[in-house]
Every structure is written in structure tokens, then in C-alpha cells.
Image (tube, rainbow, N blue to C red):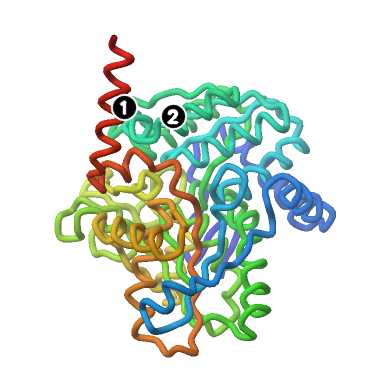
Amino acid sequence: MKTRGYFNGFGGAYIPEILVETFKELENAFLDVKDDPLFWNEYKTVLSTYSCRPTPVTFAENLTRYFNGARIYIKREDLNHTGAHKANNVIGQGLLVKRMGKKRVIAETGAGQHGVATATMAAKFGFKCTIYMGEVDMERQRPNVFWMEKLGAEVIPVTEGTRILKDAINEAFRDWVANMDTTHYVLGTACGPHPFPEMVTYFQSIIGKEARKQIIKITNKLPSRVYACVGGGSNAMGIFSGFFDDPVELIGVEAGGRGLESGRHAARLSSTDASIGIAQGYKTYFLQDSDGQMKKTHSVAAGLDYVGVSPILADLKEKGRVRFESATDKEVIDAMSLTIKKEGLIPALESAHAFVQAFKDAPKLDKDDVILINQSGRGDKDIFTIADAFSDPGWKEFIIKKAKEYNA
């Protein structure tokens, strides 16, 4: 049973007293719009005219033939404005901010997609915008930093801790405490204190609502399995929510990094390395040591190296409703390469984790089975990381040449 932000013990709002009233204001505003069909219609209208909704479902004919098993379909969240599912959440929260009368938004970002989406939303709605991003992530996601700044956002590098997503979240919360009267924190995933997990899931549920109708229309049946990558959990909760009441297996794929045995990964629900704890305002599984100190994480995908996971997904793990797997960096690069060559699609490194497990399962299924993969984002943002992983000599020559030109 879920009661006031708890999902069978996971979740909650473990926040400083100074933020209690701010969270009450946010919760009340969210509950008002959640029960208002006019708001949902406004939300869908903005997305349909600004962000390419509904996004299509694509039949991966060549991959289906290659694996000679289940028919493979792909939900194309990469076709959203800004290139990922993140637009769904930020547009929803942006409309909420307008109703609340606040003039400034802040956000954290890892892969940069949420930061770009937030900066885009702020430009559209006329908000001031500040983005916190770990110094490590800024280095590997430089194109997204460029676009955030061009969109008018102030991008602040986070140099404390491990300098990745969890540290950016900490800095964003510090900002919010100091500026809560004028500022809304656009948390990017289905984590954090209540009502964020439920609110982000609500806005991302548009993915699952669309996908269920589309796949039935296309195939005349429900999919056997639905796959999504899992960092914090927003894209997974988005597509899974459309199938919770159906006899469909749901599979979340986490970052296996350099292998679970290496300890250099971000697998919270698919490994034995995580334990239940409380951090960053909520209770869930965290990669932490015996003293409750957060461990270092690793993933080739900047958006999946978060130390925690959605409390809703933690509950679904306990219930056995979602199966969790992990994919190593090498498997991800291989799956991405295959998808590019066979289908002409370029999934983000995050999304490619879901493809890994789908490709493992597809050959074992009957040809009448249908599986659905959520391509949560596109790989343009990952060009530096991907080119490095592919050891592309032409790309290296280009980078060296440009560096010489800048230093001339």
C-alpha cells in the first residue's frame, strides 16, 4: 500500500524543516493538477505542438530477422524535442511552476539531457535557469553544456565529491534551500523526496499510455516483454506504467559498468552490492558501504551512474513485478553498434542498455512474441564517448587537428 509518498516503506520525504512548507506547497499544487483533466489536456497540447508527441513505435525489421526470434519494436522517445524523454517531465513541471507563480528554475543533470530540456523549457516559459552538473559529466558531455549555455542557462560545475550526478543533486538542494520563495527545483528523475517520484512518473506516464495503444494497434496484441534502461528510473516508470495491469513482463536494465564483480558499476537492483538506506531526502536502495557512505559508481553512460534508484522501482523489485538486469559497458557499445548498422537508429548510451537485454532475450522467444524497447534518447550527445569507445581513427585525427588550430 502506498501512503503519502511511501511505496511499501520506500520513498518518503526526509527533508530539513526549512523545506517542509515548500514541499507542502509543491505537493498541493501537484495534487490539484493531477486531478484536473484540463491540465492534462493542456500538457498534451503543448507536447504535441512543441515536442513531437505522440512519438512513434518503430518495427525493427532487420534486427528481428537478425535474431530470428521475437518481433522487436522500439518506442521512439529519442524523437522528442531535445532528444530524449526528459522533455515530458520538464514541460509538465514548467506548467506547474507557472501555476505556482515562481520565476526561476534549477535542475541537476548527469548526461546533460535533463539540463538541456530544463533550459529549453525555461526559455519557452520565460524562467531564469541554473543547472548544476558534475565536473566529470561536464567533460564528457560538452555538447550539452554548450547548448544549455546558449539557451540562457547558467551551468555551474560541481567540484565536490565524485563530481557526478549525485553531487549535482546535493548542490541543487542547497540552492533551493536558499531560494525557495522564488525558485522551483525541476528534479529530473523519479527519485528524491515526495512528491517527486510520483510527480515525475505522472508526467512520464504519457510514454506508456501511448505505447500500449500503439503496440496493440500495430500488432493486435500486447507485447510479451517491455524493456527500459534504469538510472534514477523516469523513462522506465514512464513506459512500464502503461502495462502494470497487463500480463506483460517488465525488464529494467541498469549500468553493469566494468562488470558487477569489479565493483565499478551502478547496479542497485540487479546486484547484491546495494542496501536500503536514506539519502537525498528519500529511502531506497543505495550503493553504500557499511557506514552508509555512498560508493563511487561507474558507467559509460553519464545518465545511469546514479548511486540510488526510484523508490517506486525498489518496491516493484521487492514485489517481483519488474525483473532487473545489468549490461556492461562493452555490451552496450556492441548493442549500439549493431542497432546503428542494422536499423539506422542511434540510441543514447543510456538507452542502449535496454537493447542489450532485449537482444539476449529475443532469440529465446517465439516468432509470434512481441517485445518493446524504450529508446529513451538519441546518441548525438554521446559522440565524444562513443567515438572514443569505438577507437575511431578519423575522429581522433579530427580532434587533434582542431586542438592544434585552437592552440595556434
Residue 264 visible to an observer of this rendering? yes
Label 2 SS: helix
Task: Name the residue at 38% across, 41% down.
Answer: 383
Q: In which quarter of the image is residue 178?
A: top right
In depth, the one of 232 and 383 nearer the eye is: 383
Q: Name the residue under label 2.
A: 171
Q: Of the residues shown, which amino acid type is indicated by label 1?
A: Glu
Q: How far is the residue under mark 2 from the one under mark 1?
A: 9 Å
Q: Name the residue under label 1.
A: 160
Q: Of the residues shown, which amino acid type is indicated by label 2?
A: Glu
Q: Quadrant of residue 251?
A: bottom left
Quadrant for the N terminus in the image: bottom right
Check if mark 2's residue and mark 1's residue have beta carbons within 8 Å: yes
Task: Name the residue at 65% across, 36% down.
Answer: 121
Provide residue 193's location: percent of width, then percent of height: 52, 47
Provide residue 110's location: percent of width, then percent of height: 41, 40
In depth, the one of 115 and 168 nearer the eye is: 115
**Up-down: is 365 above or below 10?**
below
Query: Around disc 1, counting alpha carbons within 10 Å, would you say few (fewer than 14), some (14 to 19), or many (20 or more)?
Result: few
